[in-house]
Amino acid sequence: MPKDNGFFERVYQIAVQIPYGRVTSYGAIASYLGSPKSARMVGWAMNASHLNPDVPAHRVVNRKGLLTGKHHFKGTNLMQQLLENEGVEVVENQIQNFKELFWDPSKEL
């Protein structure tokens, strides 16, 4: 797994701006950073973010609103629980009302 700490730090600078109760995608962050083909690397950054508790990695999901990174969280359903604590409804690992909750850094920042 390649590690580009500069890229990871830029990902974290975006992720900390995701509003409470909103979500974004790996690809949206990658596109905002000018690397639209780096969605997987954004996922690696989210996986490594457990070292920085200020990064709300639970708010970053795949382009369809699926909790594809949930296995990187401690506990069986921690990612889902964190989202639900913010009022985000999740059914079968899928965020409900994904389009309404989607936060696009390219439009918001």
Image (cartoon, rainbow, N blue to C red):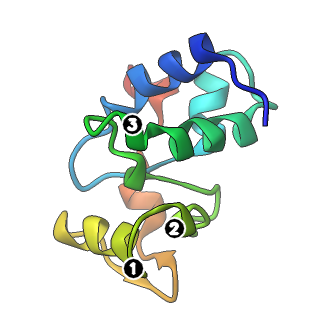
- Cβ–Cβ below 8 Å for labels 1 and 2? yes
CA separation in Å, label 2 and label 3: 16 Å
- Residue 25: x and y in percent read 56, 47
Q: Secondary structure at mark 1?
A: loop
Whether residues under marks 1 and 3 lie with C-beta atoms below 8 angstroms apart, the answer is: no
Is there any visible trace of residue 15 in the rendered image? yes
In the foreground, 17 or 82: 82
- Quadrant of the rendering where the C terminus is positioned: top left
Mark 1 or mark 2: name the one nearer the start of the chain.
2
- From the top left corner, tell me how far across and down residue 67 is, in percent: 54, 68
The quadrant the N terminus occupies is top right
Q: Residues within 10 Å of mark 2 (few under 14, many from 20)?
A: some
Q: Is residue 24 left or right of residue 20?
A: right
| Image height of 14 relative to 40, above or below | above
> Does label 1 or label 3 sit earlier along the sequence?
3
Question: Which residue bears the numbered disc 1?
Answer: 77
Residue at (51% x, 89% y) in the render: 92
Identify residue for label 3: 51
Q: Quadrant of residue 62?
A: bottom right
Residue 70 disc label:
2
**Residue 15: horizontal and vertical position, in percent?**
40, 33
- Determine whether, in the image, residue 37 is placed left or right of residue 75: right
Residue 47 spot, x, y in % from top left: 55, 46
Q: Amino acid at mark 3?
A: Leu
How far apart are the alpha carbons under marks 1 and 2?
A: 7 Å
* Residue at the image position 33 percent from the left and 44 percent from the top: 56
